[in-house]
Image: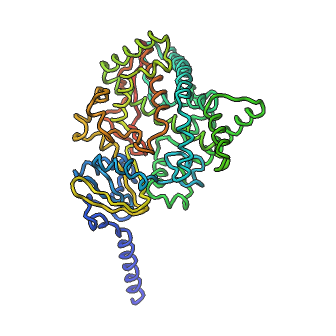
């Protein structure tokens, strides 16, 4: 009996201590006078739905954003306190005005992600400055002209691939998973732009260890990937224990091997080419290779930046155009006039595709690839909202911005759920509102691949519009639901469209 009583007392104490530990931060924001939301659970905080794959992090953050009108709201990501800034003046403070206090992003473990950890989105400090320098120096007008030319050439191959599908299925039209189709295109472009090689992506079955296979291993939408990504983004200390990374080790090994082989061929045959690999090699030599041989890491970052978000944007835009034929026709007319003027879809034509760019930006407003922007405070600072709320943050504290929330806020955008490219007219009040559009981030850590992405997206959609009519597909799953198995914003079932010959 005594043993049983002692056991129950001990067990009870353990449970009480465990509960106290797992709820230690549940009054964190209340004690600081910052509004928070109900429903925090031990261990999971407000993110249980994310971890059981009912919602993705962007969707959950959007809900938290809508739950309050305050300038800032506190919540718990697991047991980690995170401050969500809602008002645009605070977004400006975090992203630009007080950048020195918020210059860091949550990093990746370089042992688990040896290449992706060097990406300018994840890198911090001097490493970030160095990697950003590689990117910003790569996107001169000359390089963008090169990208536009490569994209145009790859679009010809894409059209041949699509026409082959028409031949197989008849000329009445074909249903297409737009994300798969456009990711094949972006693979082709990025492989050529970086390495000067064929991406071998315009096939029905991707070869083993092909670039598409590598990217799919990182970005494939599935349960195991979602669990891995949630651990990395919300419980980073577990990545070292569990040895999990965004990408499996074979991807990094295969990509490094490919990079080294191409470099060796160029060295043996004294080949130089005006591509990104050459730019990376020369940049590192000019900087005395002070970070070691990280050419493969830079090349991988370029590949990731050019592959996923561009194909996501193209697929979402194609879907929206299938629903809005009048906007599609207006885009087509602009493209046709520019092709008549220049004779082809060239860099000069791309630069004059003003309405096409408006449609791209409106697509990104409705479907920003990354709906959650997160910062790590690097030194003590006090934030003060226009509503009088004050919050002092210390080094290591987390702050985030809901791009999805801001993009769909009716106090910022009129009729925010409506697809209306006219918002992005040159003189539009909505376009001129600072920090209201965050598809590329903002401030010094804005996406460095923005111009490359817009260039290849313009070339691709212009080519599609010159050859096909985009119509709704019966395979499209509606109403739309953001897929909870992915940390980026894509929809359940993917974006399906129907293509018919023009």
Residue displayed at 37% across by 83% down: 9
Seen in the picture, residue 96 relative to 325 is either above or below; the reply is: below
Residue displayed at 29% across by 46% down: 88
Residue 34, horizontal then vertical, whole percent? 26, 61
* Total residue callouts: 0
Residue 164, horizontal then vertical, whole percent? 53, 17
Where, quadrant-wise, is the C terminus in this rendering?
top left
Viewer-proximal residue among 129 and 244 = 129
Where, quadrant-wise, is the N terminus in this rendering?
bottom left
Q: As drawn, is 368 to the left or to the right of 184?
A: left
The answer to whether residue 56 shows anywhere in this view is no
Residue 72, horizontal then vertical, whole percent? 28, 54
Seen in the picture, residue 134 relative to 204 is either above or below; the reply is: below
Q: As drawn, is 385 to the left or to the right of 170?
A: left
Viewer-proximal residue among 125 and 309 = 125
Which corner quadrant of the image does residue 366 belong to? top left
């Amino acid at each position: 009996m005594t043993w049983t009583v002692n056991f129950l007392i001990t067990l009870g104490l353990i449970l009480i201590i465990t509960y106290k530990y797992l709820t230690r931060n549940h009054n964190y924001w209340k004690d600081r006078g910052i509004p928070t939301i109900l429903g925090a659970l031990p261990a999971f905080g407000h993110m249980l739905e994310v971890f059981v794959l009912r919602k993705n992090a962007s969707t959950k953050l959007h809900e938290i954003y809508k739950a309050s009108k305050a300038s800032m709201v506190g919540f718990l990501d697991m047991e980690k306190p995170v401050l969500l800034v809602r008002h645009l003046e605070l977004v400006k403070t975090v992203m630009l005005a007080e950048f020195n206090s918020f210059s860091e992003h949550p990093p990746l473990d370089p042992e688990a992600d040896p290449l992706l950890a060097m990406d300018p989105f994840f890198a911090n400090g001097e490493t970030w400055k160095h990697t950003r320098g590689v990117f910003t120096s790569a996107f001169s007008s000359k390089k963008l002209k090169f990208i536009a030319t490569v994209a145009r050439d790859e679009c010809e191959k894409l059209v041949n691939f699509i026409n082959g599908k028409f031949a197989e299925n008849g000329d009445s039209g074909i249903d297409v998973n737009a994300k798969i189709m456009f990711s094949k295109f972006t693979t082709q472009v990025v492989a050529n732009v970086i390495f000067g090689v064929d991406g071998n992506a315009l096939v029905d079955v991707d070869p083993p260890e092909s670039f598409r296979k590598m990217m799919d291993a990182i970005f494939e939408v599935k349960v195991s990937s979602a669990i891995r990504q949630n651990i990395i983004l919300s419980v980073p200390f577990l990545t070292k224990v569990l040895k999990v990374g965004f990408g499996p080790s074979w991807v990094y090994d295969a990509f490094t091997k490919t990079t080294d082989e191409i470099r060796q061929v160029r060295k043996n045959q004294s080949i130089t080419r005006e591509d990104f690999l050459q730019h990376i090699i020369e940049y590192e030599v000019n900087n005395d290779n002070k970070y070691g041989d990280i050419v493969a890491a830079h090349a991988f970052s370029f590949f990731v930046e050019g592959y996923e978000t561009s194909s996501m944007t193209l697929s979402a835009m194609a879907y929206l155009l299938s629903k809005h034929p009048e906007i599609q026709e207006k885009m087509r007319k602009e493209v046709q006039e520019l092709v008549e003027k220049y004779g082809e879809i060239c860099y000069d034509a791309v630069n004059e595709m003003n309405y096409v760019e408006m449609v791209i930006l409106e697509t990104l407003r409705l479907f920003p690839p990354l709906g959650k922007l997160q910062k790590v405070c690097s030194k003590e600072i006090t934030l003060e909202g226009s509503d009088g709320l004050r919050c002092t943050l210390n080094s290591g504290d987390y702050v985030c911005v809901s791009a999805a929330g801001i993009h769909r806020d009716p106090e910022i955008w009129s009729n925010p759920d409506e697809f209306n490219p006219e918002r992005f007219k040159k003189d539009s009040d909505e376009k001129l509102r600072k920090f209201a559009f965050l598809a590329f981030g903002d401030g010094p850590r804005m996406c460095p691949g923005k111009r490359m992405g817009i260039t290849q997206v313009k070339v691709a959609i212009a080519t599609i519009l010159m050859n096909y009519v985009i119509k709704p597909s019966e395979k499209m799953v509606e109403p739309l639901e953001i897929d909870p198995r992915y940390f980026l914003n894509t929809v359940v079932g993917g974006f399906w469209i129907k293509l018919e010959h023009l």
